[in-house]
Image: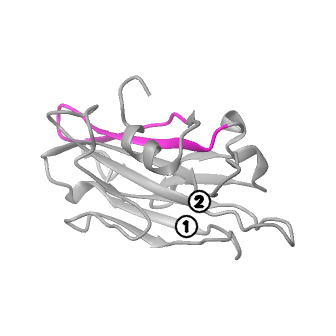
Amino acid sequence: MSGIGKGLGTVEVALRWDPSPLGSAAHDLDIVAGVYSAAAPCGPPAYGVYFDRRSPDGTISLDRDSRTGQGLGYDEVMRLELGRMSTEYGRVVVGVVIQQQGAGLTFGEVAAPGVRVREGYTELSNHDFAAVADARAATVAEFVRGPSGAWEFLDEVRGFDLAPDAFIASMGAADA
């Protein structure tokens, strides 16, 4: 927490995975975020943040973008400055999507995938995608603005069998 009763401030969502086996196509996983208005928190997203996009106000940024999983530690990092976000927005859903063309690669076929959510040095969540091994996309974090205006974290991983664009469009739906 950022302070007594203030809720979350700046949060980091970090994604890791190991490169695909030698001779096979690279595995490309991406962190994506959907931002929803306070008036329609389960409607269509007001905007999305992914790949080559960022939030219009600069409160959400994708600091690293890997297309192969090569490197040590976490390959992609998204920073969410919830404390600076306009009161117009009441919900942010963060997901991970596999950008594999053709075959429909699942998390169970990716070597050592994992996602960590933390605020500062406080770890809020850490998952290895085992619960959604048959999925091609998954929501990994949800942030909701409470009645007092403070942001709260909901830790629930949900798997989807959707292509990237379809996932981004529906990841925050109430019945997803």
**Residue 160 is drawn in which quadrant?**
top right
Label 2, on which residue?
A: 15
**Residue 78 is drawn in which quadrant?**
bottom left
Is-magenta flag for residue 139? Answer: yes
Helix, strand or loop at disc 2?
A: strand
Label 1, on which residue?
A: 76
How crowded is the residue under tag 1: few (<14 C-alpha within 10 Å), some, or many (20+)? many
Q: Is residue 150 left or right of residue 86?
A: right
Question: What segment is highlighted magenta in the picture?
Answer: 135-157
Give whichever of 160, 33 is nearer the camera.
160
Is-magenta flag for residue 18? Answer: no
What's the residue at 18%, 40% (across, down)? 149
Tag 2: residue type? Leu
Residue at the far front in the pictured view: 102
Residue 86, image x and y in percent?
A: 15, 53
Quadrant in the picture for the C terminus: top left
What's the residue at 67%, 71% (across, down)? 68
Residue at the far top in the pictured view: 175
Tag 1: residue type? Glu
**Which of the two discs, 1 and 2, labels the residue nearer the N terminus?**
2
